[in-house]
Amino acid sequence: MDSFARESAAQALLEAYETKIPIAPLTDTHEGMSLDDAYAIQELQTRRRLEEGRVLKGHKVCLTSAATQRQLGVDQPDHGVLFDDMFFLEHAPIEAGHYLAPKVEPEIAFVLRSPLAGPGVTVVDAIGAVDYVLLALEIIDSRIRDWRITILDTVADNASSGGLVLGSTPTRLGDVDLRLVGVNLHRNGQLVATGAGGAVLGSPINALVWLANTLGPRGVTLEAGAVVLPGSITAAQAVDPGDTVTATFSGLGSVTAQFAPAPSTSEVR
């Protein structure tokens, strides 16, 4: 793709955010699109949002489970960025209508105490850079119609980012084995998914190492205070207005996302 095609793709995604009208897969409309193209399209949107006054607060990793990688025919994760307006308070109503086709994933978020820059980051380095972990529910969304995505489409679309809800109880890494943490995900009181931390590249800490070493050669450092979402522990679950989603993590507590009811006909008028 040339620079004009990349700009065109980035603008199409930005317009989908604003209009809430999804677009066709970029891989259908841009023949020969590469992974480098996809990340360049993501970066163009990131720059635009920063110019508009949004603040970069962290990063996310996705496609960390073997099943998801097989589904999209890839052998590596991908990544996106988190802005300040993506963070929602636990139990505070979230407007589901803000999204096109939202889904929720349970994760264990890292909060960094010190910067982390690759290449060459090891597990020891990553553990030393983590201040604490928080329970999280990530809201993923797709500006691509019907979630008909390849890895190139999701990368260009900021790794299908939407938002996140963080729990309020920090846990030190030394107090938990992330590989063995189990999670039960409930939607409106009904169990819809289960999983364990080991589903995330063997351990969520491995996703943090991968991210630091992937971003480092591009001149990007994971800064102190950044939030890093390492990837979902279970399959993503679709949500509707009025839904309540709770993830309960063994030995760590729970985190809840509350989606506001759809507006009534009179309210819409």
Image: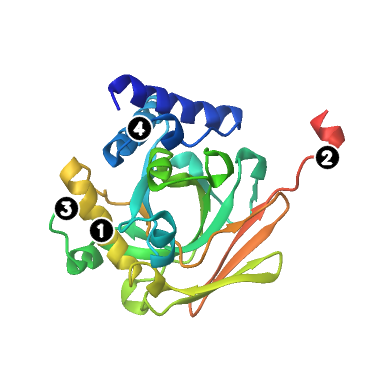
Q: Residue at x 35, y 58 (%)?
A: 111
Residue that label 1 marks: 210
Is residue 224 visible in the rendered image? The answer is yes
Above or below 148: residue 23: above
CA–CA distance between discs 4 and 2? Answer: 38 Å
Q: Earlier in the sequence, mark 3 or mark 1?
A: 3
Above or below 108: residue 41: above
Secondary structure type for disc 3: loop
CA–CA distance between discs 2 and 1? Answer: 45 Å
Are the residues tagged 4 and 2 within 8 Å (C-beta)?
no
Q: Residue at x 44, y 59 (%)?
A: 71
Q: Earlier in the sequence, mark 2 or mark 1?
A: 1
Residue that label 2 marks: 264
Q: Residue at x 35, y 71 (%)?
A: 172
Q: In this view, does 17 lie to the left or right of 186?
A: left
Residue that label 4 marks: 41
Image x and y of residue 10, in percent: 41, 28
Q: How crowded is mark 4: few (under 14 residues within 10 Å), some or many (20 or more)?
A: many
Say which of marks 1 and 4 sits in front. Answer: 4
Are the residues tagged 2 and 3 within 8 Å (C-beta)?
no
CA–CA distance between discs 2 and 3? Answer: 50 Å
Amino acid marked by disc 4? Ile
Secondary structure type for disc 4: helix
Q: Is residue 246 left or right of residue 177?
A: right
Are the residues tagged 1 and 4 within 8 Å (C-beta)?
no
Residue that label 3 marks: 118
Above or below 127: residue 88: above
CA–CA distance between discs 3 and 4? Answer: 23 Å
